[in-house]
Image (cartoon, rainbow, N blue to C red):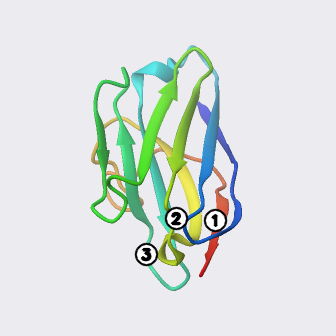
Amino acid sequence: QVQLVESGGGSVQAGGSLRLSCAASVYNSVNYSSYWMRWFRQAPGKEREGVATISPDAATTMYAGAVKGRFTISRDNAKNTVYLQMNSLKPEDTGMYSCAACFVPECSATGALRAPYWGQGTQVTVSS
């Protein structure tokens, strides 16, 4: 069992920065450092999309094209926490940001590869 809690969302103007955190509580001998971690976002009226992924050992990171070069995902396994540093924010980055713990890097929001553990999300609003 893994419980995830996001924090750090808020309202900023375009060009600003935010740092999101996702803290995990693990139970029943679950090893947090064995999970791929992903950040997803969902804008109003749109499907949830993956924006950043990090491997269990933090050696591999992957980004959606729309955020590459602006967002940085990192993790601290000693603190069971994954972060998303978001710079040069744009209005189109507005949405509910959620973290997920996955068994595979390509885990998704729906379907057979749906991530088993999700946080409740934190809202990010970027104004122009």
Mark 1 vs mark 2: in front: 2
Q: Residue at x 43, y 75 (%)?
A: 47
Secondary structure beneath disc 2?
loop
Mark 3 vs mark 1: in front: 1
Q: Residues within 10 Å of mark 2 (few under 14, many from 20)?
A: many
To which residue does mark 2 refer? 89
To which residue does mark 1 refer? 124
Q: Residues within 10 Å of mark 1 (few under 14, many from 20)?
A: many
Q: Residue at x 70, y 49 (%)?
A: 8
Disc number placed over residue 47 in the picture, else none: 3
Residue farthest to the front? Answer: 15
Hey, what amino acid is under mark 1? Val
Asked if the residues shown at circle 1 and circle 2 are in contact, with their CB atoms under 8 angstroms apart, the answer is: yes
CA distance separating discs 1 and 2: 10 Å
Mark 3 vs 1, N-terminal side: 3
Hey, what amino acid is under mark 3? Glu
